[in-house]
Each structure stands twice: as C-alpha cells, then as structure tokens.
Amino acid sequence: MSRIGKNPIALPQGVEVKVDGNVVTVKGKLGELTQELTSGITVKVEDGTITLERSSDSKDHRAAHGLYRALINNMVEGVSKGFTKELELVGVGYRASNQGQKLDLALGFSHNIILDLAPEVKVETVSEKGKNPIVKLTSHDKQLVGQVAAKIRSFRKPEPYKGKGIKFVGEVLRRKAGKSA
C-alpha cells in the first residue's frame, strides 16, 4: 500500500473542495486550483477530510495514488497558506529590481534580463547595503513558483569556485578548491 496515498488530507477552515468526475477543484482565500486525475483514483470528501482510493493494485495505480494525494495536499496548502521561494544573487554588481510583474536582473551580462512573470506569482525584491539582493516569489501554486524560481536560477547558476550566481536562500553549494590549493 502507498503510505502517502493512504494518509487523509485535513481541510483547514475556509477551504472548499469540489469533485466533478475526475477533476478536483480546491478554492480558498488565496485562489483556486484544479487538478485532473487519471482513471483508477477516486476522491472522497467527508467530515473535513479528503481521502484517495485506488481501484486496483497495479503498478500505475499505486504510483498515481501517492502522486495525486501529494498534489491535492499541495493545492489545499497553497490556497490556505501559500508558498514562498527566495533566491539570493551572489556576485559583485548583481542587482534585482521589479516594477509590478516585471523582474529586472543585472547579472554581469552586457544587458539586463527582463522577465515577465505570471499574474499568479507575486514578486518582491530586497536590496540592503552590504548584503546580497534577494528575490521573493509567492503564489498559491507550488508548481508555478518552483518553475519560475528554476527559470530565474537558470540565468546564472552558482559556480563551484567562488559561489557566484543565483542560488536559493539556504542552499548549500559544493565548493571546489582552486588551482593554488
């Protein structure tokens, strides 16, 4: 049995779940998310909890059981609390600023990188003197926040010698010794 798939999902106050055939819609104070399920997985909502059941013990159904439980749990958590990713720009002259949904990054290239963000993702930049600039991304959709953060990080990945680049706050980088060591 899938240990993750068997766990029930507790619904917080103010979160509404609707199951229409194989489409699950979760609505909360931060927004609304939908997820389409494959056949073989059924969702039951009762007494403020969501439980997922599978029709058989085939390999595909076992894999989907845990997957959809995790996805629905992330949807419930997203519309009630939201998700935040923080990126840190490490390097001399690396800067970040935003005007609404446009993120402007100066990463040592000959030109600035301007990224238009989806309206579901809120962006905030923090630049303090003597500290590295930080880009904060918040949204109710965990997948979208992760995708946008990965896109921003891909513009200048951290290099292993000096650690320059865009990294997640709290990320531990594997460092290498240079030639002189």
Image: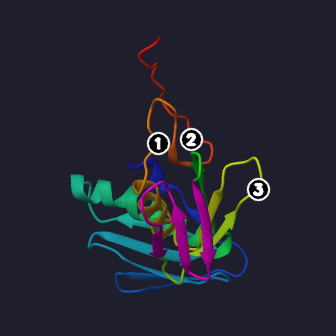
Residue identified by numbered label 2: 171
For residue 58, which quarter of the picture? bottom left
In this rendering, the label closer to the viewer, 3 or 1: 3
Camera-side residue of 107 and 5: 107
Circle number at residue 128: 3
Looking at marks 3 and 1 on the same chain, the residue that comes earlier in the sequence is marked by 3
Secondary structure of the residue carrying numbered label 2: loop
Q: Residue at x 62, y 61 (%)?
A: 135
Task: List the residue tagged with mark 1.
Answer: 158
Model colouring: rainbow
As drawn, 47 above or below 4: below
Name the amino acid type tagged 3: Glu
Which sits earlier in the primary sequence, circle 3 or circle 2? 3
At a point 54% along the width and 78% down the height, the residue shown is 102
Q: Is residue 80 visible?
A: yes
Q: Which residues are magenta?
A: 94-115
Q: Residue 38 appears in which quarter of the rendering?
A: bottom left
Measure how far apart labels 3 and 2 are at the Cα level. Answer: 20 Å
What separation in Å lies between label 1 and label 2 (alpha carbons)?
A: 10 Å
